[in-house]
Image (tube, rainbow, N blue to C red):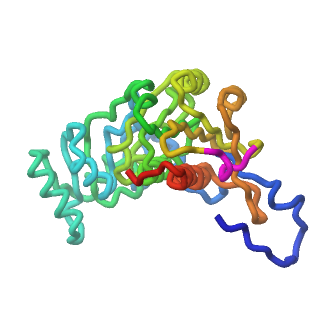
Amino acid sequence: MSAPRKRGSRGGSKRSGPPANRKADGGGRRPPDEDRSPRVSDDAGGRRPNDGRSRRPPRTAKGLGGDQVEGRHAVRELLLAGKRRVREVWVIEDLDQADILDDIEELSRELRVPHKAVTRRRFQAEALTESHQGVLARAEAVPSVELDRLAKKPGAFLLVLDGVTDPGNLGAILRTAECAGVTGVVMPKHRAVHLTPTVTKTAAGAIEHLPMALVGGIPTALRSLSEMGVRTIGLDAGGDVGIFDVPIAHDDRVALVLGAEGDGLSRLVRERVDHLAAIPLAGRLNSLNVAMAGAVACFEVVRRRELSPEFDGA
């Protein structure tokens, strides 16, 4: 990987230290303009204002969630994967013609899934995101798998999430993870977002292909992973090694650990991982958000495995 390009001095305040000493953690600071779900308050009459979102109160999903999938790519991938039962598909009746809509209708017919064209008003009353693209599906929830099943897979590449709470971040992380070849994801049961409709939309179908384990606590899960021979790498600004310098062989079983937005890795997690690694930053900003940091780290694991002398391209 080439070294960061040198830049001449620029106007404004000077940097507080050399670029090599500034590193990004797996959490980072949340940008001020990052998408957030708007708060909805009741009016004086106790009715929820019509803001284009669902008029139903949000449902509390059990387990991982994922029972309502919104967005064209996410719904098509749900039908294509065929890994869980789909109860029904809804589309807005006056949508412009698109190939992906034809695919969804054809797949629904092949799988004998009820395919309903409904009015925009009725659809909006049921949708739980603002970027649904006029398509939603209701399906069985995504099942959780056992941690040891993920850990014992040869060449396992796991992603462990230590309290990610933003649905947009989680969806982006899962989409990147699936593209990078991650073989399993580990999430905590508490104090973290799971598979909400916003997550499923942002993940664009990745949740259909990523086995996920829901665990009681991340520190305990990391100890179990280490006992099973999985090398754990925590992404942290205070890491004693750069992510580009962590030795990884093509057949190593690896678990990459990302921290929560803002706070990064918890103290116990920092103590339990085998390596604390950081992403060196060469610019003026001092952090990456968790989704971006996770993307850099995931593909660095892929790169180092491919550079291993024993890599056979399989």
Where's residue 238, x and y in %? 77, 43
Q: Quadrant location of residue 106?
A: bottom left
Asked if residue 164 lies in the magenta stretch, the reply is: no
Q: Residue 174 in the image: state x and y as whole percent.
A: 46, 47
Q: Could one spot residue 198 in this view of the protein?
A: yes
In the image, residue 132 above or below residue 237: below
Front in this rendered view, residue 31 or 180: 180
Tell me which segment is drawn in magenta: 241-247
Q: Give percent across and percent down for residue 84.
A: 24, 37
Q: Examine the rendering and report whether any part of residue 50 can be seen.
A: no
- Where residue 276 sits in the image (x, y, percent)? 70, 39
Give the residue drawn at x 52%, y 29%: 188
Residue drawn at point x = 59 percent, y = 38 percent? 257
Which of the 4 quarters of the picture holds residue 16? bottom right
Within the magenta stretch, is there residue 244?
Answer: yes
- Between 63 and 182, the one nearer to me in the picture: 182
- Is 239 or 175 nearer to us in this picture? 239
